[in-house]
Image (spheres, rainbow, N blue to C red):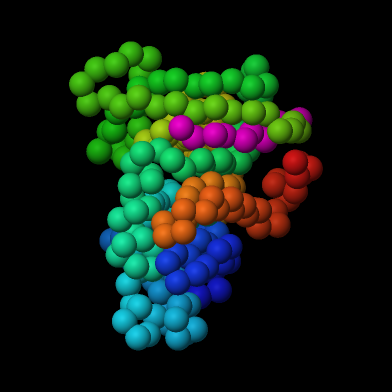
Amino acid sequence: MSDAFTVVFQDEYLIVVSKPSGMPVENDPSGTPSLFDAVRYRLTGQQLMCDGQRFLGVVHRIDQPVAGLVIFARTEQALRRLHRVFRERSVEKRYWAVVEGALSPPYGRLEHYLSNDRQTNRARVHSTAAKNRKRANLEYRVLGHSDRYTLLEVNLHTGRHHQIRAQLSAAGAPIKGDLKYGARRSNPGGGIYLFARSLRFPHPVSGQLLSLTADPAPDVLWDLFPRP
């Protein structure tokens, strides 16, 4: 279980890891082994959670079928400060997405309002504001093309439920494998081609700006596109 992720950054205050698709960040009713438990197991095995340092807190989440960077806090103070950084939108979050078809123009901004359908666990996309709708903004840039797919870099400005998945689908470019949002077919293993590629945020104690990046695991489709 502890080898299911890779460590990108680690000190006594936080640990940033790259999770595989299909693994939930936290425990859920399905019983699928969680990233939280895997990280805790790894730290305990390294004897880095002894002498009072047994705290591990979830700073943010990415969806279960999504892979990429996730931050955990290792002290309560770090967790509070990192939560504040996310609330104040002082985190730059960039994703890679492989979408079906093409998206035009090659650089653009998507602005919608999202509501949550609890029965289907889907985000609904709207063009106008209303009660129970939240503003959702992102920017995208085309990084590459193939015959059937396009590689995008997405700069996420708001962190709404299923935001990237819903907005790209509404723009006519569903993410490869994302049946919930209109993809033609699923992927083996149930993951989707959305990857939390990079994070930039101030360290919760030193204030130093951290700029962290990860690459998707080797894969025929990801490897089809040259890395920028």
- Toward the viewer: 28 or 58? 58
- Using residue 16 as the reference point, say whether residue 223 is left or right of it: right
**214 drawn magenta:** no
Residue 136 percent across, percent down from the top left: 40, 27
Would you place residue 64 above or below residue 168 in this image?
below
- Quarter residue 107 falls in: top right
- Toward the viewer: 55 or 129? 55
- Using residue 126 as the reference point, say whether residue 218 is left or right of it: right
Q: Is residue 20 visible?
A: no
Residue 172 percent across, percent down from the top left: 54, 22
Kindly give the residue lying farthest to the left in the view shown.
131
Q: Please report the residue visible at 59 percent of the width from the left and 20 percent of the height from the top.
A: 108
Q: Please report the residue visible at 50 percent of the width from the left and 61 percent of the height from the top.
A: 16
Give, as a single range, the part of the protein colored magenta. Answer: 147-157
**148 drawn magenta:** yes
- Using residue 183 as the reference point, say whether residue 131 is left or right of it: left
Would you place residue 156 above or below residue 108 in this image?
below
Q: Please report the residue visible at 38 percent of the width from the left and 15 percent of the height from the top.
A: 127
Q: Is residue 15 visible?
A: yes
| The C terminus, quarter of image | top right
Would you place residue 202 above or below residue 39 in this image?
above
Residue 216 percent across, percent down from the top left: 64, 53
- Toward the viewer: 4 or 46? 46
Q: Please report the residue visible at 33 percent of the width from the left and 13 percent of the height from the top.
A: 128
Residue 48 percent across, percent down from the top left: 44, 81
SS majority, magenta: strand
Q: How many marks?
A: 0
